[in-house]
Amino acid sequence: MIFDRKYIFETKRTRAIRMALNSLMGVVAFFIGYFVFLLIILMTAKSEQTRVSEGLYQKSADAIVVFTGDNGRIKRALDLTTKWPEARVIISGVYGTNTLKTIVTGQVGAEELLKSPVQVEIDYEALDTLGNVRETLEHLDDSSTEIQRVLVVTSDYHVMRVRMIFEHLMKNQTYEVYFEGVESNWSKWNNISKLLKESLKTLRVWVILKLS
């Protein structure tokens, strides 16, 4: 305890003050720890971006995988096909009634990118992030072409959880997996809310993976 008993005998008032101070310090420590965890989530995306710059500087990605779920992801993945036109694009987590055309509708510049030859595969099976990773690995394993380097595109706040799941599910696979996070605008409350929710999901996944 930070504020322990100084004397053997203490009054109810001093005991109440001591307990209140200990509780306050506990709350402060919790929020500091939680804030640090949020920073770690965002710094993970930054460090993975550095890995992409270094690992794919003179090499090309054989596959670009993008997980649906937030704006900017699919557009970013298609942007990267101009850099690596030979790369296969896998869009995971698409709702059953959607097509490639309906997916890109309304995304500025995305439809224009599809006018050039792009190899796109759509996964309709995945329902969550765990499913995204599992279905992606199955697609890669079943590929008729050799795939070594994989770039996963998602949101920056999502990178840490995605990487955790990939590391857990990749057992015998030897793919070089890189992660690119689409940057969020942290001046908007909506994005801060997504980060807070993502932190809880990340903690939950960490516990599940540790117990499995």
Image (cartoon, grey):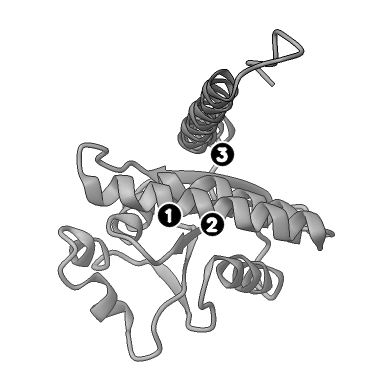
**Label 1 crowd bin: few (<14), some (14–19), many (20+), radius 10 Å:** few
Left or right: 17 as drawn, with respect to 192: right
Label 3 environment density (alpha carbons within 10 Å; few <14, some 14–19, many ≥20)? few
The reply to whether dot 3 and dot 2 touch (C-beta < 8 Å) is: no
Q: Are marks 1 and 3 in contact (CB under 8 Å)?
A: no
Residue located at (24% from left, 80% from top): 102
Residue 13 placed where, x, y %? 53, 22
**Which kind of residue does numbered mark 1 sit on?**
Lys
Whole-percent x, y for residue 77 in the image: 38, 55
* Rendered position, 145 above or below 14: below
Image depth: mark 3 or mark 2 in front: 2
Q: Which comes before the other along the chain, label 1 or label 3?
A: 3
Q: Report the residue marked by disc 3.
A: 59
Three-letter amino acid code at the position of disc 2: Lys
Q: CA distance from mark 3 to mark 2?
A: 33 Å
Label placed on residue 172:
none
> In the depicted view, which residue is nearer to us: 139 or 40?
40
For residue 15, above or below residue 146: above
Corner quadrant of residue 19: top right
In the rendered image, residue 128, in percent from the top left (x then y), is placed at 52, 71
- Of the residues tagged 1 and 3, which is closer to the observer? 1
Task: Give how far apart the Cα atoms at labels 1 and 3 are.
Answer: 35 Å
Query: Can residue 150 be seen in this snapshot?
Result: no
Q: Residue at x 68, y 52 (%)?
A: 206
Pointer 1 residue: 197
Q: CA distance from mark 1 to mark 2?
A: 6 Å
Residue type beneath disc 3: Lys
Mark 2, residue position:
201
SS for dot 3? loop
Residue 70 occupies which quadrant of the picture?
A: bottom left
